[in-house]
Image (tube, rainbow, N blue to C red):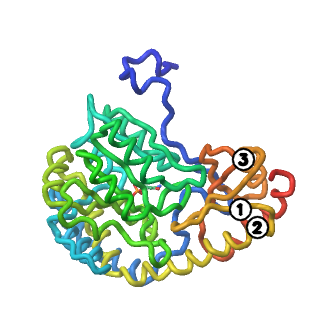
């Protein structure tokens, strides 16, 4: 067996571990923020038809610029009231690929990205993969961002890319638009607002889409993996100034988005209302989890996402194992005292709360 150490690996990748949410055979998988609701039957029928149609042309390369899909995505984003043009939208295989393309274009060797940790663990991993230096930004003990301190840090570090995850993963914390505006004004770099969970936000928590006009270095990234319940599709997208779309086209691989992916995503977008019908139900389960925690002697971080960071445990990893022994898989995100659970169906919430009722007394 050859070990990694024997290969001429890039030095900055040595000693690193790959992204690794465990994919275990557990009855209740509440660890990767997927939407557990089955896709509507009417969508499955359209998908079959759309994929069959696209298959007839599989001997040809797909539309390299995914114009029809970007037009549909722009129409979806415009539903919220902020007009987004197709030329402002770019799509790729999951928002992870969107973020990678952004770092390939705006980060890279000799450049730096900054994000406010704890946040989405892939931001530093994609930075490393693109040779971009990484700086941890600070949060308060309650996981909110102190705008004053964040602005000061950005002024000092002068990063080329600033990540703001809102709602934040793994804490669920939404970031005030005013903080994003101030960060934008404090940097000459690109500000990427990762809004993977935007659709789950509580009312009164606006998207950063409204900040795009007049801010050419601002990027909002979204995904169909969460609210749309289509994590297996691998479709993420961004909205920004058309010049940002020109920039990512310099680094994207030609034909990166297969014709099957484009066809399936368009079919799904045609059923947006049916797909997003589960969002309110998921938010209800999130709020139910939050409400139940105090009676178990536990607490949570206010969440605008489809998951809840809950604690505090004496030893989060021991509590994680104990829940697993009850057939419930949650996520140990490495924050001492805390674990993260995905909100899903009422039955999943029942199973989670029952297991937690057994586990909490011994572990909190
Ligand atoms: N951003 C955040 C904050 C996430 O939590 C995730 C998925 N866990 C992603 C981006 C990537 O999602 P995808 O590649 O499936 O679009």
Number of disc labels: 3
Q: Nearer the viewer, residue 361 or 358?
A: 361
Mark 1 neighbour class, 10 Å CA radius: few under 14, some 14 to 19, many 20 or more: many
> Which residue is the site of mark 2?
294
Name the side, left or right, on which 154 lies relative to 56. right
Residue to which mark 3 is pinned: 316
Q: Residue furthest top?
A: 6
Residue found at x 38% / y 66%: 224
> Is label 2 or label 3 in front?
2
Labels 1 and 3: the sequence-earlier one: 1
Dot placed on the residue nearer the N-terminal end, 2 or 3: 2
**In the picture, residue 29 is in which quadrant?**
bottom right
Determine the secondary structure under disc 2.
helix
Q: Residue at x 14, y 45 (%)?
A: 250
Task: Say whether disc 2 or disc 1 marks the residue closer to the N-terminus.
Answer: 2
Q: In the image, is residue 236 above or below residue 189?
A: below
């Amino acid at each position: 067996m050859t070990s990694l150490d024997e290969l001429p690996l890039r030095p900055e990748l040595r000693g690193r571990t790959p992204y690794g949410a465990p994919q275990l055979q557990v009855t209740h998988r509440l660890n990767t923020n997927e939407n557990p609701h089955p896709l509507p039957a009417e969508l499955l029928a359209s998908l079959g038809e759309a994929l069959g149609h696209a298959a007839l042309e599989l001997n040809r390369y797909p539309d390299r610029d995914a114009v029809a899909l970007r037009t549909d995505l722009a129409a979806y984003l415009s539903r919220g009231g902020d007009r987004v043009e197709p030329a402002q939208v770019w799509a790729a295989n999951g928002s992870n690929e969107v973020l990678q393309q952004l770092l390939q274009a705006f980060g890279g060797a000799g450049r730096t990205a900054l994000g406010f940790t704890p946040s989405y663990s892939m931001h530093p991993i994609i930075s490393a993969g693109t040779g971009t230096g990484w700086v941890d930004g600070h949060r308060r003990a309650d996981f909110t961002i102190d705008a004053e301190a964040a602005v000061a840090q950005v002024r000092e570090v002068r990063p080329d890319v600033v990540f703001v995850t809102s709602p934040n993963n793994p804490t669920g914390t939404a970031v005030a638009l005013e903080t994003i505006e101030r960060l934008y004004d404090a940097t000459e770099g690109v500000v990427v607002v990762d809004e993977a969970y935007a659709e789950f936000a509580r009312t009164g928590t606006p998207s950063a889409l409204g900040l795009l006009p007049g801010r050419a270095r601002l990027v909002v990234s979204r995904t169909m993996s969460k609210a749309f319940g289509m994590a297996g599709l691998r479709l993420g997208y961004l909205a920004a100034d058309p010049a940002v779309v020109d920039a990512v086209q310099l680094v994207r691989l030609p034909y990166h988005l297969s014709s099957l992916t484009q066809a399936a995503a368009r079919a799904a977008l045609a059923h947006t209302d049916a797909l997003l019908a589960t969002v309110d139900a998921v938010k209800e389960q999130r709020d139910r989890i939050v409400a139940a925690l105090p009676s178990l002697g536990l607490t949570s971080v206010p969440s605008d996402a489809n998951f809840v960071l809950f604690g505090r445990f004496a030893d989060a990893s021991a509590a994680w194992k104990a829940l697993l022994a009850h057939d419930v898989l949650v996520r140990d995100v490495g924050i001492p005292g805390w674990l993260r659970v995905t909100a899903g169906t009422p039955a999943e919430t029942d199973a989670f709360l029952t297991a937690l009722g057994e586990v909490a007394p011994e572990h909190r």
